[in-house]
Amino acid sequence: MTPQTHIPARAWAALLLLAFIWGGSFLAIRTALDEIAPLASVLYRVAPAAAALWFYVLLRRLPMPRGRGAWGAFLLMGLLNNAIPFSLMAWGQLHITTGLTSILNAGTAVWGVLFASLVFADERLTGRKAVGVALGFAGVATAIGWGALLSFDIRSLAQLAVIGGTLSYAVAGAWGRARLRVFPPEVAAAGMLTGATLLIAPLTFALEGPPPLDLAPRTLAAIAYYAIVATACAYLLYYRILAIAGSGNLMLVTLMIPPVAITLGALVRGEELHPSALAGFALLALGLVVIDGRPLRAMREAFDATPSRR
């Protein structure tokens, strides 16, 4: 898709809505984890979302995927984009705040640029992107705390688990581009979530036992939110933004999510973030701005258009 420099007003509105939806998902997942185990929280996320998306696909009469190749691609995408990152981040959220989780999650865009440059010839790592990636690395390290990189307490391991999830997202992005572009986006999302369900269900039963069914209303509400709203509906909104604003503009949502998650974590759970986490997010945001390039070009064009003073 051709990059777009101008973002329509309706795309901005959709981006803000998506940021609020995904920002709220961190709080919803943490709320559910008060009562259910990490793998069960993932199963309760991907299975209902897959069912909702298949209902949408059938309603729209979209072409159904056929052949073992298609379902093999969905299975691997479900592993890389759902089963692994959702599980790692759910376990990580047991030990770190929702705000810090969202900040580390924003690093997905940085790792995605780096990994894509290694795989695709048309996404090579330019000098500007290299600077942005370096700033992104520094931002994540600052958010974690440079001293924590040398320690191996449970909090450090939880942060590393979240980072592992973002790396899995980056690999999934490359796999999705290579193998899933032939499917309608909604079908690809439904197939991916089905693959994730097939993988996470037996693992959940083997390691945690049957997922509990007698859940508190607040847990059920949290699950309904992050499964139906923040996964199934969010994918549909995601693809709408992609169509009207372009893939490059979608990266902006990663900058909008952490403020939402940080605010909700503070208001609802009384969470506090260390100043280093906020400084790390600022560095990470700067890195993403440099990678994107458009704000820098806009500043340069504005400077060039300014009449020189004599």
Image: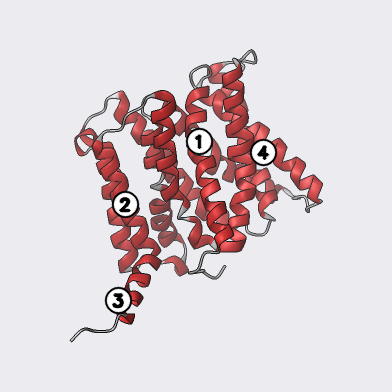
Residue 297 position (above or below residue 66): below
Task: Decide if residue 11 is in sight here.
Answer: yes
Other residues around mark 4 within 10 Å, as few (<14) / some (14–19) / many (≥20)? many
Q: Which mark is residue 24?
A: 1
Inter-mark Cα distance, 3 to 2? 26 Å
Inter-mark Cα distance, 2 to 1? 23 Å
Q: Position of residue 32 (x, y in %)?
A: 53, 23
Residue 293 position (above or below residue 39): below
| Residue position for label 2 | 136
Element at label 1 = helix
Element at label 3 = helix
Q: Quadrant of residue 287?
A: bottom left
For the N terminus, the quadrant is bottom right
| Residue position for label 4 | 194
Q: Amino acid at mark 4?
A: Thr
Q: Nearer the viewer, mark 4 or mark 1?
A: 1
Tell whether label 2 touches label 4 (CB within 8 Å).
Answer: no
For the C terminus, the quadrant is bottom left
Inter-mark Cα distance, 4 to 3? 51 Å
